[in-house]
Amino acid sequence: MNFFKTPSVLKRLYPSLTWDKFQDVGLTEERKIYLTFDDGPIPDLTPWVLQTLKSYQARATFFCVGDNIRQHPVLYQSVLAAGHRVGNHTYHHLNGWDTDNFRYLKNILQCEALLPLERQSEKKLFRPPHGKIKFKQIQQLLPRYQIIMWDILSGDFDADFNHEVCLERSIYHTQSGTIIIFHDNYKAQKNLMYVLPRYLEHFTEQGYSFEVL
Ligand SMILES: [Zn+2]
């Protein structure tokens, strides 16, 4: 699977997870897109993403892997300094389906220790690596986390996925309130470097802004 538009039946099956912001933007009638970047921060690619976002005054949410924050603390600080939001993506990029619940939660808390404190009124953000999380894990996390899934999976991580198709489909399926996933990891680099500036250009021209979750 590369590109994936989340069907509404799946969203209805898991209403406690956040799939999009359609209702929020519907109230304001503003044109907003929620860009998310998973798996960073990493040298070379994350700075390029930051620079590209800056040139469109776009803000985004970065779901960071704790071990990458540990390895690249200065880069991590530059993500925060640019006004982006960061969320938890576990410390070791664990697949929830393959991980016992205690170890999964512990790994999330290990990542959490590296993240900035949120305002008390706000829940922290978590995205399960690979989108794979067990029901019990969801229940354990919900008191402290808003679990962010997606409306559109861009498919950038699949190097065999044609970058033009990746761009076309991402544009076609985006609407105001969409949460879209990109990746600042090396597997995604080729597609991301093609798609991201063009995607930003397209929706900037259409009067959209890019906001943090
Ligand atoms: Zn990931």
Image (cartoon, rainbow, N blue to C red):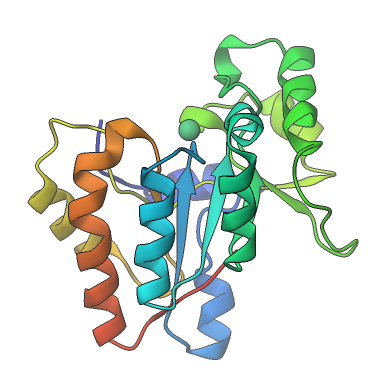
Q: Position of residue 95 (x, y in %)?
A: 55, 19
Question: How many numbered marks, from 0 up?
Answer: 0
Does residue 49 appear to the left or right of 164 in the view shown? right
Up-down: is 1 above or below 189?
above
Q: Is residue 53 visible?
A: yes
Does residue 108 appear to the left or right of 49 in the view shown? right
Q: Residue furthest front?
A: 74
In the figure, residue 97 lies in which quadrant?
Answer: top right
The answer to which of 76 and 104 lies nearer the viewer is: 76
Q: Is residue 15 visible?
A: no
Q: What residue is rendered at 63% in x and 64% in y? A: 81
Q: What residue is rendered at 75% in x and 51% in y? A: 124
Q: Position of residue 77 (x, y in %)?
A: 64, 52
Q: What residue is rendered at 29% in x and 38% in y? A: 188
In the figure, residue 80 lies in which quadrant?
Answer: bottom right
Q: Quadrant of the N terminus?
A: top left
Q: What residue is rendered at 12% in x and 47% in y? A: 163
Does residue 208 appear to the left or right of 112 in the view shown? left
